[in-house]
Structures are given as structure tokens and as C-alpha cells.
Amino acid sequence: MPISNSFKPGKHFLQIPGPTNIPDRVLRAMDYPVIDHRGPDFAEIAKRVLDRIKLIFKTDEPVIIFPSSGTGAWEAAIVNTLSEGDKVLMFETGQFSSLWQEQAKRFKLDIDFVPGDWRTGVDPKIVAEKLSKDKDHKIKALFVVHNETSTGVCSRLGEIRKAMDEVKHPALLLVDTISSLASIDFKHKDWKVDVTVCGSQKGLLLPPGLSFNAISSKALEAYKTSNLPKSFWDWKPMLEMNKDGFFPFTPATNLFYGLDEALNMLMEEGLENVLNRHTRHAEATRAAVKEWGLEILCKKPEEYSNSLTAVMVPEGHDADALRKVVLDNYNMSLGMGLNKIKGKVFRIGHLGDFNDLMLAGTLAGVEMGLKKSGIPYKAGGVMKALNYLAQ
Ligand code: PLP
């Protein structure tokens, strides 16, 4: 049970941009005895999950599932494809791209970290410029965080891929989809992504605890020459054992039951409907924010995130104080501003298992919180969003 100073009736609104609300169907599916992970029943579930998860990544190539948070899958992407001293291109789009860069530094990669303002995504023009100057193909990989959860900025991956193709550069493309998969359109195969990194706790409707690498055949070729130390994260024993539905170590059995059910739910709704639902809720949220007269952190509408909205509070006001008012009075958790933008923004998560009335409640909590905390705003954002949804 969560530790709380006082009893709060009703349902807690978990509106951080992940971990997200777990559907009851997924909770019920995990509430089942642990079975032998080397027995035939588990193998059947694992094979079914490993096969169907490919549809979510839009790939027919292998997907590996680790028992870890997303940070582990970042590390797996690095150690299985690169070697010490390899030149790589990374982009400072926010907190998570900065952390991935820190991790890559520890593996002694030679990093060109393109600075950013935490309000815009990866610029495809800079990609083209950097790669076209690299005539002898020293750059081995490009790292992109598709949706920066810290800023609510979604990089335009299709255009980035196009820029790479136009200059005919062979660098690997490593992409973090931790807060975009199953909420914002992502195409592993069509965009020729070499390693897609994901985690279970956002669009995949699960608790934290599973992480993913979707792998291309080019990444498997790179594996053969990569010299970084790998043991737990090594793809090879995983791929060999996964063929029969087994793992080189104990898999997170009950999370697999949950993932199997989450995949049922995503298929029943239809992936394209899931993506459209996220677009609609994001549009309604942005309509509310604009009506309140507050600024969205993401500068470019073409980079707006459909899984979360980061909202700036006016100069002289503290976003964390607002979040506390909302939590104390309305029992809702909003995402905090991380690192450089601490106290300056709050983040509304609108991804995962979410519907119109949950969004209405979320926005109502924000609007009441704005009023109670004395932040200047114009009333009516909730109504604006409701009108949008009712169209
Ligand atoms: N990348 C992104 C885009 C994230 O949102 C997160 C976590 O929220 C991470 C990486 C790190 O993942 P984890 O905390 O599961 O290790």
C-alpha cells in the first residue's frame, strides 16, 4: 500500500507521463501463480508475446525483452552494436537524451553531443549537415530520443531517416521510444531503425520492469564486430533461447502474463485507433492550455508530443508548488520539471489506458489547481477541451 499521511477517498489520478495507469484487465492477468519459466506453458506465452510485440514496433525483425527498466535497454543497444572509441552523434533534446549521453560516455564512445534548448527536437537539417561532412563515415551511430518525456517534444523521425538516406550515410540509427511506442506513430522497419529501445511502463500499459530492444539485421551485423563488454545484456544467448520461448536467465514471469493481456487490449482497440486516441487527447489538452493563456514548452507545433504536454508557469511562479496543491487537494499526480526546467514546468501525462472522462478530470484538476495556487490564468480551458472532444 502507498504510504500516505491522510486517507484520500476516491481514485488517485496518476497523470505523470509514465508509469501510467494499469488497466484492470492487465492487473488481473498478472494475479496468477508463477509457473515454471522452463516449462511448456511459459514457453507458449513467451513465444506468443515475442511474436505479437513485433506488430507494435511495426517490424518483422526480432524484439528482445529484458527484465529491467528502460535504462537497461539503452545500455543493451550500446554494448551490442558499438566499440570503444566509436564516434557517435547525439542530441541534447532534454533530460533523457542527456542521461543516455552520460551512459554512452561511460562506455568511452567519442560523442558529438549537439546542444539543444530543451524546447525543440532533433533538427533533420543538422543531421544532414553533420553526416554529409563525415565523408569517410567515421560516425557509427545516431542516437535519437523519439519523444522527450522531460519536455513533451517529439522529434520527426521520418524526416531524420530521410536526411540520413539523402546523404547516403551508413550510420546505425538507435531510437528511444520509451514514451512514444503505442501512443505516437513509430515505424521500426519503414524508418530503418537499427535498435529501438522501449520500456513497459507507458504506452504498453504495464508496470515498470520490462525493457525492449527491437533489432534490425544491420544491427545484428554490427553485433559481430562490437567489442564493448556484454554479459547480462548480450543479445546472442537471448536470441538463441527465445526461438523456443526460453531465456538465458529468469524472465519476469508475471509481467509476461500482463504483456500478453496488454497486447490483447491493444489489438482489440487496433493500433491505429490507439494512436488516434492519443492525438485527440493531446489536441484537447493543448486547446485547454492555450485557453488558460499558458505556454506549451514545445516551441514547434510539428513537434508537439501526443503522449504528454509540458506546460510553463509564468515567471515568478513555482510549478512544483502548483503540483503540490493539485496533489494535496485533488489527489492527482502531475509530472515535475526535471533538471534545467525544475519548477518552471509541470507535465500532464495523457498516454496509456486513458479516455475522455479521465482527461476531463485531469484538466479539471489542473484548472482548479491554477485557481487555488494563485497562478494567473484565464478560466475556461476545461470547457475548451470538452468542446473539442465533443466535436
Ligand atoms: N527514456 C525516456 C524517453 C524516458 O521517458 C525514460 C523514463 O521515463 C527513460 C528513458 C528511462 O527509463 P527508465 O526510468 O525506465 O530506466
Image (cartoon, helix red, strand yellow):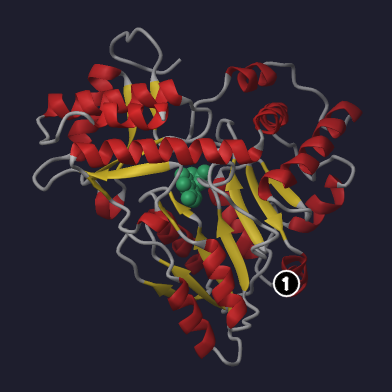
Counting from the top left corner in percent of width and height, residue 74 is at 57, 56
In the image, is 283 to the left or to the right of 217?
Answer: left
In the image, is residue 333 above or below residue 278? above
In the image, is 153 to the left or to the right of 376?
Answer: right
Instruction: Give the class, few, some or many, for how many residues have Cα within 10 Å of label 1's Cα (few <14, many ≥20).
Output: some
| Residue, disc 1 | 222
Q: Which residue is found at the position 58% from the left and 31% from the top?
A: 205
Amino acid type at circle 1 is Ala
Image quadrant where residue 349 sits: top left
Nearer to me, 388 or 57: 388
Nearer to me, 122 or 225: 122
In the image, is residue 28 above or below residue 135? above
Counting from the top left corner in percent of width and height, residue 374 is at 9, 30
Element class at badge 1: helix
Q: Which residue is found at the position 57% from the left and 22% from the top?
A: 23
Tell me the quadrant of the picture where the C terminus can be found.
Answer: top left
Image quadrant where residue 266 sits: top right
Q: Which residue is found at the position 40% from the left and 62% from the top?
A: 121
Counting from the top left corner in percent of width and height, residue 55 is at 73, 45
Specify the farthest residue to the bottom.
135
Specify the farthest residue to the front.
391
- Answer whether residue 106 is visible to the viewer in this image: yes
* Total number of numbered discs in the rendering: 1
Counting from the top left corner in percent of width and height, residue 196 is at 63, 56
In the image, is 81 to the left or to the right of 13?
Answer: right
In the image, is residue 116 above or below residue 206? below
- Answer whether residue 325 is visible to the viewer in this image: no
In the image, is 313 to the left or to the right of 168?
Answer: left
Disc 1 under 8 Å from ligand 1? The reply is no
